Image (tube, rainbow, N blue to C red):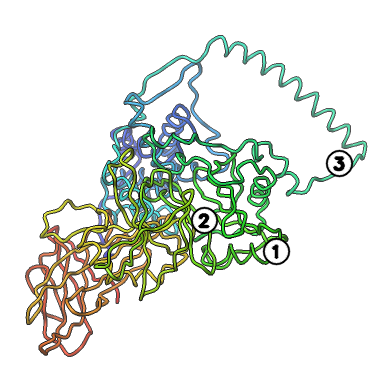
């Protein structure tokens, strides 16, 4: 990323900063509001956002010291708001010094549906990612500017935050979030319950008196030298009232047919051991105390803060399996049906994410992976069993048909995949020579017989495969399902690029044909960028040239990047190609906004280059129609 040094400008003073705060007050409050967690509730969140912006202007002496070297009052204030909002959102005890509005409740004026959709989407992001999203969408900054702002306030990994925000943009591409849905400066007021408030005052007085009496009693006991037995952490967690078999949430069997939220919350519990309280208690205990837990790609392993939802409890491949969902994560508990240690430990290990799962004292194991913001495709199947026979999936209740196709043989028709109670027959693990892939079709009740592809890359959730056609097709610039002939042909040559991403927590992968190039001697090559995104927001981008009659030619790769995503739609790559009729060439291509390419000292108009060369070495840059310079993906 190029950083341009701005010319020296006159430093701003306190008067300019105060004026900037007054002029931009609504924008700053909205920025803080979007970063703060929705779990605070709208009343406290609105008050907190106003408090953060008002604290952005310190006393005059301190402000003069902070303004040393500053030339942009708005940028200075934005960084102050960002830093305080992220700090408050990340704190265990946030917002101690809220402004107060006694007797009133504050709510955004706009529709509840829009507010709820925006709050729900942002709640799945980290505070840093919410800040990145707000800077790009609300403040209208470029991605590079947003990253610089985050880096300026001390965020160590701003690119990860940008990538996580980009994932949200991809997920909501078909129904973009309305950033204006919540305006914390345009609110409506409502009174609190006046009678309850008076009763609460009396209750507070009684509670304070009781608390003082309790403190005195505890002090007397402590000074009397009485030792209190210490309860082990495991025992304390076992006694948590919410984590019991009876309190597990169970969704009605037909809810998925009559809901607008088609994800794991719509899964009914299935399996032949739903009433086995002993098994369910063991699974909850394993999650509570962290016994034999394996986290997929760094998923938090902390116990759920409320009773999770039961998705499955039964016997699969002679193993006891319990599948739970806490609204953010999936947890699969596996133990031997016979109670022996060896079988269960082996069952939970093979490819269950981040290596082999650790086993507990009884051979049981628990695998946890992220599943936040899942949808009709990413919540369509879960890995329920892994053994020497292969991988079995538990499909969602809305899956009408399940077939199996070999991704590297696109001309071979999909074969029927047997299922029993939603569980598939064992499927071999994919290799570059044979890549078994699920082709599922949802019921017309939820998505008009929507067909899509899922592939196994370790973990609990299979990877959703999509495809974006070349510019010449005139298609919409958004990923579509990879079940078309063109989509299958592109994945047939690029599936092997996913092999290094095993057990990395990949959520989705998209093949984007960003350019088509006539090849010297005849034929047309397709330039494809394969974008792979994880559940935690990180991403990989790899470019290949798909030429007729040859395997895919590697053309560049980037790690922890937003390249080839909704947040970074410009790409440049090159490949060394030998023509069938003779002659070697350096081929280069850029996406649609590239209007000039420089390759090894020569400049070419347009976004395609074919240069005769006997070397694969390429010094490559491009010029964009926006005036910016674009560098190529690393080889």
Tell me where residue 564 sits by quadrant: bottom left
Left or right of 555, for residue 509: right
Tell me where residue 449 sits by quadrant: top left
Residue 352 visible somewhere in the drawing = yes
x then y, percent, for residue 208 = 72, 21
The 10 Å Cα crowd at callout 2, few under 14, some 14 to 19, many 20 or more, is: many
Q: Residue furthest top?
A: 195
Query: First in sequence: mark 2 or mark 1?
Result: 1
Q: Is residue 338 depicted above or below 313 in this figure?
A: below
Q: Which residue is mark 1?
A: 341
Q: Which residue is mark 2?
A: 384
| Near-viewer residue (601 or 21) | 601
Tell me where residue 108 sits by quadrant: top left
Residue 228, label in figure? 3
Give SS at disc 2.
strand
x then y, percent, for residue 34 = 38, 39
Give SS at disc 1.
helix
Name which residue lies at 31% across and 32% down.
181
């Amino acid at each position: 990323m190029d950083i341009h040094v701005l010319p020296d400008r006159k430093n701003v003073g306190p008067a300019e900063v105060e004026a900037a705060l007054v002029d931009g007050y609504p924008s700053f409050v909205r920025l803080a509001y979007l970063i703060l967690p929705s779990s605070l509730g709208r009343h406290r969140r609105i008050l907190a956002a106003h408090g953060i912006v008002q604290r952005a202007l310190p006393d005059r002496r301190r402000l003069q010291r902070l303004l040393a070297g500053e030339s942009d009052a708005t940028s200075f204030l934005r960084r102050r708001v960002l830093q305080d909002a992220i700090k408050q959102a990340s704190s265990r005890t946030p917002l101690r010094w809220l402004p107060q509005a006694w007797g009133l409740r504050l709510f955004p004026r706009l529709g509840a549906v829009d507010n709820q959709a925006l709050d729900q989407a942002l709640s799945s992001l980290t505070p840093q990612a919410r800040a990145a999203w707000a800077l790009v969408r609300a403040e209208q900054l470029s991605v590079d500017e947003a990253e610089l702002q985050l880096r300026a306030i001390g965020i160590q990994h701003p690119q990860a935050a940008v990538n996580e925000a980009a994932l949200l943009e991809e997920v909501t591409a078909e129904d973009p979030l309305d950033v204006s849905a919540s305006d914390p400066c345009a609110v409506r007021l409502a009174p609190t319950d006046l009678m309850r408030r008076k009763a609460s005052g009396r209750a507070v007085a009684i509670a304070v008196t009781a608390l003082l009496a309790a403190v005195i009693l505890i002090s007397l006991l402590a000074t009397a030298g009485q030792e209190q037995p210490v309860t082990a952490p495991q025992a304390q967690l076992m006694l948590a009232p919410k984590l019991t078999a009876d309190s597990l949430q169970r969704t009605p069997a037909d809810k998925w047919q009559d809901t607008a939220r088609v994800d794991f919350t719509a899964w009914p519990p299935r399996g032949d051991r739903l009433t086995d309280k002993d098994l369910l208690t063991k699974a909850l205990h394993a999650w509570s105390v962290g016994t034999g837990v394996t986290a997929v790609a760094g998923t938090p392993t902390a116990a759920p803060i409320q009773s999770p939802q039961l998705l499955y409890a039964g016997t699969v491949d002679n193993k006891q399996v319990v599948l739970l969902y806490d609204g953010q994560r999936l947890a699969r508990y596996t133990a031997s049906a016979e109670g022996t240690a060896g079988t269960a430990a082996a069952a939970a290990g093979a490819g269950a994410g981040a290596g082999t799962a650790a086993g507990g004292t009884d051979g049981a194991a628990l695998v946890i992976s992220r599943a936040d913001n899942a949808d009709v495709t990413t919540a369509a199947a879960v890995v329920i069993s892994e053994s020497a026979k292969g991988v079995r999936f538990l499909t969602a209740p809305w899956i009408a048909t399940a077939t199996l196709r070999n991704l590297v043989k696109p001309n071979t028709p999909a074969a029927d995949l047997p299922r029993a109670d939603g569980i598939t027959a064992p499927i071999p693990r994919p290799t570059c020579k044979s890549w078994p892939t699920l082709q599922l079709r949802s019921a017309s009740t939820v998505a008009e017989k929507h067909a899509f592809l899922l592939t196994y890359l370790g973990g609990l959730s299979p990877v959703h495969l999509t495809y974006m056609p070349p510019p010449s097709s005139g298609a919409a610039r958004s990923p579509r399902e990879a079940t078309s002939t063109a989509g299958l042909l592109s994945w047939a040559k690029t599936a092997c690029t996913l092999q290094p991403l095993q057990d990395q927590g990949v959520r989705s992968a998209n093949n984007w044909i960003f350019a088509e190039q006539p090849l010297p001697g005849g034929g047309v090559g397709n330039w494809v960028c394969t974008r792979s995104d994880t559940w935690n927001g990180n991403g990989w981008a790899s470019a290949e040239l798909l030429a007729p009659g040859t395997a895919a030619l590697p053309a560049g790769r980037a790690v922890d990047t937003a390249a080839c995503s909704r947040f970074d739609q410009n790409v440049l790559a090159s490949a060394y190609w030998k023509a069938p009729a003779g002659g070697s060439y350096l081929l280069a291509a850029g996406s649609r906004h590239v209007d000039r390419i420089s390759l090894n000292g020569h400049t070419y108009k347009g976004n395609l280059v074919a240069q005769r060369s006997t070397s694969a070495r390429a010094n490559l840059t491009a010029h964009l129609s926006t005036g910016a310079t674009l560098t190529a993906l690393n080889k």
